[in-house]
Image (cartoon, helix red, strand yellow):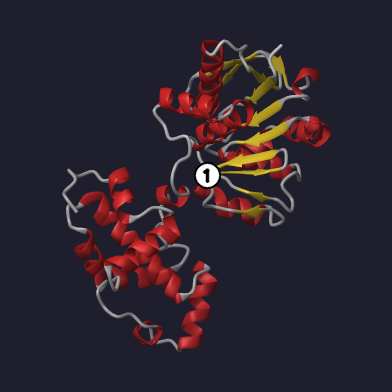
Amino acid sequence: MADSQIAIVLYPGFKLLEATGPLSVFNYANAQLIAAGRPPGYEVSFAAAAPGPVMSDNHISLQAEVALDDPRICGGRVLFLGSPDIERAVADNPEIIRWLIERGARSRALIALCSGSFFLAEAGLLDGLRATTHWRVADKLQQRYPAVRVDSDAIFIRQGHIWTSAGVTASIDLALSLVEDDYGRDIALNVARELVVYLKRQGGQSQFSALLLSQEEEHPLGAKIREWILAHPQENISIHRLAELFAMSERNFMRTLKKQTGQSPSQFIENVRLELARQFLETSRHGLKQIAFETGFSSQEQMRRTFKKRLGVSPSDYRHRFSSTVQEAE
C-alpha cells in the first residue's frame, strides 16, 4: 500500500490540465523513488459522484475509478479542480460541497487547485484562512466569500491541512511542493527537471495577470484617466493636475477613483505605468533605461523597484520570460 493516497475529484467541465499536471508529478515521483531503490510513494485515483467517464473542459474524458463517497478517500489527500465557469460548477455539484462539509475534516489534506478554492469556500472551510486562486477570479472569490483572506498574488498557500493554488500550471508547483515535503528536495528537483519546470518559480502570479483590464464599462473615470496617462506617460502627473483635467475637486476625484477602482491615484498611476512598461518589455527591443523614460518612471532603478515590489521579478527577468522579440544586450 502506498504511503500517500491521493484522490483527484472530477466533475463535468473540470480543467483537464489541473488533473493531468499533478498526476504527472506524482507519477514521475514514483519513478524517481523506484530508481532510487525505494517503493513508489503515491497511489492516485480519480473520484467522481459516480464511477465512469467524466468530460473535461477540453472535450477529453477521464475515467473516475471510485465514487466520491468511497470511505477509502477520506484518509488521504483530496484534490479539487477548477472550472472555466466555477460558480456554475459549484451550483451544479452539491455532492462535492456536501462531501467537504461531512468528511473533509477527516482527510489528510484538502487541496484546491485554481478556482477549485470556490468549493472549499462554499463549504465554509476557508473562513478566516489565507487562500489563493486564479488571479482572474480572485476578486470574485473575495466578494462572494468575505470571510476568506484572499491573496491574489500567491502561487500556492498552505494553511494547516488545507492547500490552495493559483491558476492551472500552479497545480504543478503545488504538487512539487508536496513531493518535496514527502520525499525531500532531491526527488522533487529531479521531477522538476524531468518536467522542465522550476522547482520553485520566482515571483507571484501577478507577473502573469493583466494588471488593468478594460475598464470602460465598470470604471468610467478609471478608463479616462488610464487613456490620458497612456497618451502622456512622461508627464509629471499630480493629483491636482488630474482632478483639474476632469473638472473635479481633489477630494472628490480621490474619493471617486477609490470607489470605482479600489486604488489611490498614486497606485493607479503606478499600475498604468507598469502595464505600459510590461508591453514595451514584451514587444520592443528598447533598453531598460529608455523604457523607464518612455513610461514615466523617474529612473531605471525606480522601474526595477516597482517590478520587484509588484511582480516579484526584475524588468530584465520579466523580459526574458515574456518577450516576443529577439533579446538585445542590456
The percent coordinates of residue 29 (x first, y second) are 54, 20
Given residues 212 and 207, the one toward you in this image is: 207
The quarter of the picture where the N terminus appears is top right
- Seen at 25% across and 74% down, the residue is 232
The percent coordinates of residue 200 (x first, y second) are 48, 39
Given residues 135 and 156, the one toward you in this image is: 156
Q: Which residue is mark 1?
A: 155
In the image, taking residue 76 as reference, residue 205 lies left or right, namely left
The percent coordinates of residue 227 (x first, y second) are 32, 69
Asked if residue 203 can be seen in this view, the reply is: yes
Q: Is residue 291 above or below residue 145?
A: below
Q: Is residue 50 above or below residue 189?
A: above
The quarter of the picture where the C terminus appears is bottom left
In the image, taking residue 260 as reference, residue 228 lies left or right, namely left
The percent coordinates of residue 313 (x first, y second) are 39, 52
Q: Check disc 1 and give the amino acid type.
A: Ile
- Seen at 41% across and 58% down, the residue is 308
- Seen at 54% across and 52% down, the residue is 152
Given residues 108 and 232, the one toward you in this image is: 108
- The part of the image, by quadrant, that contains residue 286 is bottom left
Q: Secondary structure at mark 1?
A: loop
